[in-house]
Image (tube, coloured by chain):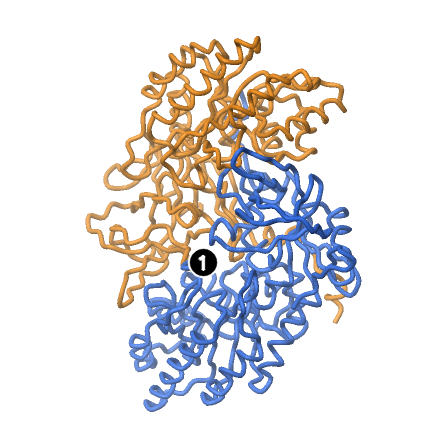
Chain colours: A orange, B blue
């Protein structure tokens, strides 16, 4: 559920007319509902209440400081994947002991900084990384907690770019290798392998792959406990799917019902890393119709948001529902395209879209996750503004870029400036 | 040809050791050769010397101010596609009368600004856009030059996202519609249709599609001249392919030999819009090996550059040659992947790559075009630095981003800051 609903045929974000936001702040514009954001987090927490997990919101889904702060305020930890995300986590005052750090490519500087700040643990993706963290921790005379990311080799039905739990992916460590590492854990004097981590992919709508992965890792936990290896944490990652189109994802409660018994049996502290589930449907992208172009073959609705603002359709073939801010009963088949000079710049293809006219606004739904966070300045386009509606008020949480922002770090060599 | 060559088994950019650049400025790092950049421009100019065309470099390929300034200094005009690119063009002192402006989605503000600055002309992509430019020009009591972008409906063998001259693409106006528009040109009192524009796609390695498109448009010019419609400009766009792998693209001279006779016959002033041809092989992306990860199925070379730095492999399945900065004779099949948390984050797949070790540097070749210009902050990664080698010296032309840059425009609402 989310708080983007029509009242009297006009789209509202909570109790605020979305068109008012578009007219005040311009377009393209990301709009977030604070109530929806909080609601999704609370639903997940309640569903898993009997486990009292640490819910580490996945910063990469949407890293805006206001989003992070809102979630941290209500008890979320943060799942980070880079030094930049660590800076963000610290900026919003997330307690370090609620930060977990994954990524196949952590640099020495990133590892050192995370150790210095005292994060809860690293999710370790390979033996060389474990060796490296051990080396850096030794240099600091510290013993650092890590969780081994297991690649459980389960099949997941999602886009090939966001399946991460197959053995052919770059992520995690296969069970055999993990077993060997755990048996030789005493070789690593400066790391404490305190947990296991799994994350099998993103936008997974069914429970079965999660159950399969958790069963595999549960069996593994039993196997190593027979060798006297005890753990403290089980990090089950994220990946819960949301509704973009006609998906029918399991609810937080059904998901919890499926896996809670399995998780309880492990006796470990559970960590979760939801991103899209929390923020995906808490945000929309507003765009204005610039031109209606009818060619002999097609109708194109040309809008002011492009693939630089939302790359999911181009990159993953992702579906986003598109609705007008003022309800229009008639629809017509059209391609919804942006101003960028490539054919890949589309938001919807051959879709029945409301018969809008120039100047009308459209909402691209479910754009809260992997929307702004993947945006770029391609075609020297200014990145969009972001606003949050909360408690009947409107807050600008990211100012629209200006041309100065584009060129801020650029320098023209002296020999080129003197003719 | 380009100036990234091995000497004594080490990669140089002109006379500068690339490893020195990586060690001084860090990685990932974009490195450009000024000599190569200029050479490509001059080659094109010389090949077409008998036509004396206005060569408008396509800013979207690489919009760094230093690149633009270098080309403007030697006589290039600029092909822009947004208000942001107009700001850049003006920033480097490009004469307004050497700027042409294309894009299917020009906003009113962008059109007004371009008119105010006095650009040469707009490439107009649709009848509604023509109407709109006419309306805005009328408000300013001006008569504005435009070229009609013709969609010649020719087949081009390139990635579907970068073919732009088929009638099913969003670009340009079909010949029949263009004919009707020209016949009723007197209805538009505030625009002067002074030219035609074609641009059939990008990374096209053979001459045939260009010849086909130019023949179509030449016939069209003859047809309209019979109706007493005279033109001033023919803008033949860009799209010339370069060598990434084993392509064998036509040289500038062969391309010129093919089309010059056709172009001469039109009697029009020729405009060209090359981007990739000029800058594609004038830049490389340097990345450092972070981890070598061997799984039961694959070898992964994990480097510090990701899809946020270079999205072409993920978005287009593009091939970039990858070579070590220090020559290594042995190779091994591996996936070259970045630190980003998706399986789409790769630079090369199942490729025979030099047997590098941790800490070694690799050069991703041919990264000058659509490299940095498409980069993003995904995973809150800092965008790379860019350096240019010129005349034996090194110039930082873009400083590496810092964490402050990531959060610069973000604001946390007051109600979230007070607990």
Query: Which residue is located at x 75 percent, y 56 percent?
Result: B9
Residue B119 visible in the picture: no
> x and y percent of residue A230 in the render?
56, 10
Residue B261 or residue B178, whichever sits in front: B261
Residue B259 or residue B254, whichever sits in front: B254
Per the image, label 1 sits on a secondary structure element best described as loop
Residue B116 or residue B379, whichever sits in front: B379
Please give left or right for residue A239 compared with residue B272 in the image.
Answer: left
> x and y percent of residue B348 in the render?
55, 49
Q: In this view, does A286 lie above or below A227?
A: below
Image quarter where the N terminus of chain A lies is top left
Q: Which residue lies furthest to the left in this view?
A: A329
> x and y percent of residue B267 in the render?
47, 89
Check disc 1 and report the residue beneath it.
Answer: A340
> x and y percent of residue B239 in the render?
49, 68
Q: How crowded is mark 1: few (under 14 residues within 10 Å), some or many (20 or more)?
A: many
Task: Name the quadrant containing residue B117.
Answer: bottom right
Q: Is residue A405 above or below residue B87?
A: above
Residue A150 visible in the picture: yes
Query: Which residue is located at x 45 percent, y 61 percent?
Result: A341
Image quarter where the C terminus of chain A lies is bottom right
Please give left or right for residue B263 compared with residue A107 in the image.
Answer: left
Residue A289 or residue A194, whichever sits in front: A194
Q: Residue furthest front?
A: B330
Q: In this view, does A300 lie above or below A27?
A: below
Query: Which residue is located at x 49 percent, y 63 percent?
Result: B81
Query: Which residue is located at x 34 percent, y 18 percent?
Result: A258
Disc 1: host chain: A
Q: In this view, does B158 lie above or below A327?
A: below
């Amino acid at each position: 559920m989310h708080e983007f609903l029509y009242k009297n045929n006009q789209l509202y974000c909570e109790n605020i007319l979305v068109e008012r936001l578009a007219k005040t702040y311009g377009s393209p514009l990301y709009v977030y509902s604070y109530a929806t954001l909080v609601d999704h987090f609370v639903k997940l927490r309640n569903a898993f209440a009997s486990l009292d997990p640490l819910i580490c919101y996945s910063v990469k889904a949407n890293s805006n400081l206001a989003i992070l702060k809102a979630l941290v305020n209500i008890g979320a930890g943060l799942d980070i994947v880079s030094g930049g995300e660590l800076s963000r986590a610290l900026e919003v005052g997330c307690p370090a002991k609620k930060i977990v750090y994954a990524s196949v490519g952590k640099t020495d500087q990133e590892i050192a900084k995370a150790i210095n700040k005292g994060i809860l643990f690293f999710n370790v993706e390979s033996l060389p990384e474990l060796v490296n963290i051990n080396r850096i921790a030794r240099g600091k005379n510290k013993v650092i907690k890590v969780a081994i990311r297991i690649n459980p080799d389960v099949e997941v039905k999602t886009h090939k770019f966001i399946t991460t739990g197959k053995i052919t992916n770059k992520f995690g460590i296969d069970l055999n290798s993990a077993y060997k590492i755990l048996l030789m854990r005493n070789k690593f004097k400066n790391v404490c392998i305190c947990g296991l981590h799994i994350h099998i992919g993103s936008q997974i709508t069914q429970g079965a792959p999660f159950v399969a992965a958790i069963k595999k890792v549960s069996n593994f936990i039993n196997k190593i406990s027979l060798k006297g290896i005890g753990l403290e944490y089980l990090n089950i990652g994220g990946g819960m799917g949301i509704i973009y189109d006609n998906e029918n994802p399991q609810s937080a409660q059904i998901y919890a019902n499926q896996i809670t018994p399995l998780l309880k049996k492990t006796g470990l502290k559970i960590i979760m890393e939801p991103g899209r589930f929390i923020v995906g449907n808490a945000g929309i992208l507003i765009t204005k119709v610039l031109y209606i172009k009818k060619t002999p073959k097609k109708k194109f609705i040309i809008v002011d948001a492009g693939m630089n603002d939302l790359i999911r359709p181009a990159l993953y073939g992702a579906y986003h529902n598109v609705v007008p801010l003022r309800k229009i009963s008639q629809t017509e088949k059209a391609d919804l395209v942006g101003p960028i000079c490539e054919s890949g710049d589309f938001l919807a293809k051959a879709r029945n879209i409301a018969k809008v006219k120039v100047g009308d606004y459209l909402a691209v739904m479910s754009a809260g996750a992997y929307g702004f966070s993947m945006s770029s300045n391609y075609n020297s386009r200014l990145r969009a503004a972001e606003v949050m509606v909360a408690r009947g008020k409107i807050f600008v949480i990211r100012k629209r870029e200006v041309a100065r922002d584009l060129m801020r770090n650029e320098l023209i060599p002296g020999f080129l400036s003197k003719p």
